[in-house]
Image (tube, rainbow, N blue to C red):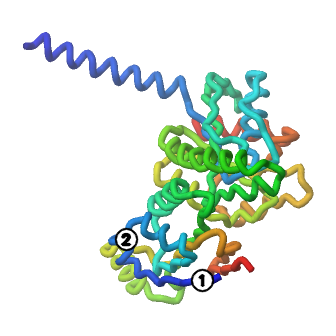
């Protein structure tokens, strides 16, 4: 199997529609996004995935990890981070989405995501 | 002119009163969760306890419930109070549905494809019903890892919609059940351990439902 990985800056997610992401995943592409998706974005992806499921496409594996501010960072840094998130509408973290035929499972640990691929 | 305004005002007041009573007399209790967490078994136990009727069929094969099922006027008592609920059992939410999984369980290809198609519609229906709920039981299988994206997405949706909810750690009758793992993963939410199959701790669940709505 020829697996491809697409790194997607969160800012570009606004331009790309979900059907486009699903088309990538149908071609065995795993998508990494440098932010945590919002609940409404995750829900919309699940809904659109259900509409796209067919004999050839069984769905997706999806996992998001939110990065909370480092405990050692100063209050000013934390506030600056929060302000930037507010302005950009971006939540610090990472999201992995990929076809369920390719990704066996995504194990979510408190501070990282672990991808197990189908063999 | 004045009469016309008075009539309109009267209409608005009556609408408000009607919606108020409608809300109070029909509390919608939704059961949400991943596939095969025991939602229908729990809905059946609740409805058998209070109205002597079941809601739907249960099966070990995933996606047995593919449509929203409802039992109306289920009076639940607890903490010396009574409330009338519409118990709404929803299809399990999933991110993948592979018809080949059903074939592996002995289903014909055609039936498996049909089941998969119905299951995808069921997931969409479940999500759409989120807006209609007054209180939700998020049913999790205590024998499985609770750090599941489906659980996280359901809880996030309920929080965003400000729908009160209780996490139900189900299947405590099984030896490998770990309710503590669910408590550790979601310490910020109300959690209760039960067995919908044996009825273990159901009285405490009823008390908690009434308490949540009071």
Q: Vertical placement of A53 versus A78: above or below?
A: above
Chain letter for mark 1, please: A
Tell me the residue that label 2 is attached to: A16
Q: Between B86 and B125, which is closer to the camera in this rendering?
A: B125
Q: Quadrant of residue B85?
A: top right
Point out the tag, 1 or 2, that comes first from the N-terminus.
Answer: 1
Q: Residue at x 64, y 69 (%)?
A: A100
Labels 1, 2: one chain: yes
How dense is the environment of label 1, judged by Cα within 10 Å: few (below 14), some, or many (20 and up)? few
Q: State the quadrant of the N terminus of chain B.
A: top left
Please state the horizontal and vertical placement of residue B137, each as a whole percent of the image: 65, 44
- In the image as oriented, which residue stretches furthest toward the top? B3
Mark 1 and mark 2: Cα distance apart in space: 21 Å
Q: In the displayed structure, does residue A56 sit left or right of residue A15?
A: right
Q: Vertical placement of B147 versus B13: above or below?
A: below
- In the image as oriented, which residue stretches furthest toward the left? B1
Please state the horizontal and vertical placement of residue B134, each as a whole percent of the image: 53, 38
Determine which of the numbered discs, if any, sits on residue A3 in the image.
1
Q: Between A103 and A3, which is closer to the camera in this rendering?
A: A3
Please state the horizontal and vertical placement of residue B141, each as a whole percent of the image: 76, 54
Q: Nearer the viewer, mark 1 or mark 2?
A: 1
- In the image as oriented, which residue stretches furthest toward the right? B175
Q: Residue at x 76, y 35 (%)?
A: B57
Helix, strand or loop at mark 2: loop
Q: Residue at x 41, y 81 (%)?
A: A9
Q: Quadrant of residue B16?
A: top left
Q: Is residue B170 visible?
A: yes
Chain letter for mark 2, please: A
Q: In the displayed structure, does residue A23 sit left or right of residue B91?
A: left
Q: Is residue B138 visible?
A: no
């Amino acid at each position: 199997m020829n697996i491809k990985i697409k790194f997607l800056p969160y800012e570009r997610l606004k331009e790309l529609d979900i059907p486009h992401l699903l088309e990538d995943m149908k071609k065995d592409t795993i998508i990494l996004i440098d932010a945590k998706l919002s609940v409404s974005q995750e829900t919309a992806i699940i809904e659109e995935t259900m509409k796209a499921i067919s004999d050839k496409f069984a769905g997706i594996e999806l996992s998001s990890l939110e990065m909370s501010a480092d405990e050692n960072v100063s209050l000013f840094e934390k506030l600056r981070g929060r302000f930037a998130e507010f302005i950009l509408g971006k939540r610090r973290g990472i999201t992995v989405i990929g076809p369920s035929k390719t990704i066996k499972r995504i194990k979510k640990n408190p501070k990282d995501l672990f991808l197990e691929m189908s063999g | 002119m004045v009469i016309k305004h008075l009539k309109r005002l009267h209409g608005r007041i009556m609408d408000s009163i009607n919606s108020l009573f409608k809300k109070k007399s029909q509390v919608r209790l939704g059961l949400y969760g991943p596939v095969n967490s025991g939602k229908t078994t729990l809905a059946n136990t609740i409805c058998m306890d209070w109205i002597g009727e079941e809601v739907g069929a249960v099966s070990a094969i995933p996606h047995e419930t593919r449509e929203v099922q409802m039992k109306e006027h289920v009076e639940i008592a607890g903490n010396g109070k009574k409330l009338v609920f519409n118990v709404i059992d929803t299809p399990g939410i999933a991110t993948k549905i592979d018809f080949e999984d059903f074939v592996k369980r002995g289903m014909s290809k055609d039936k498996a494809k049909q089941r998969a198609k119905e299951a995808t519609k069921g997931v969409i229906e479940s999500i759409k019903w989120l807006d209609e709920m007054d209180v939700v039981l998020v049913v999790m299988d205590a024998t499985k890892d609770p750090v599941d994206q489906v659980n996280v997405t359901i809880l996030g949706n309920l929080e965003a919609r400000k729908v009160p909810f209780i996490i139900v750690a189900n299947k405590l009758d099984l030896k490998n059940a770990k309710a503590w793992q669910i408590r550790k993963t979601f310490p910020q939410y109300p959690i209760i351990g039960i067995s919908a199959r044996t009825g273990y701790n159901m009285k405490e669940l009823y008390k908690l439902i009434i308490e949540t709505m009071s």
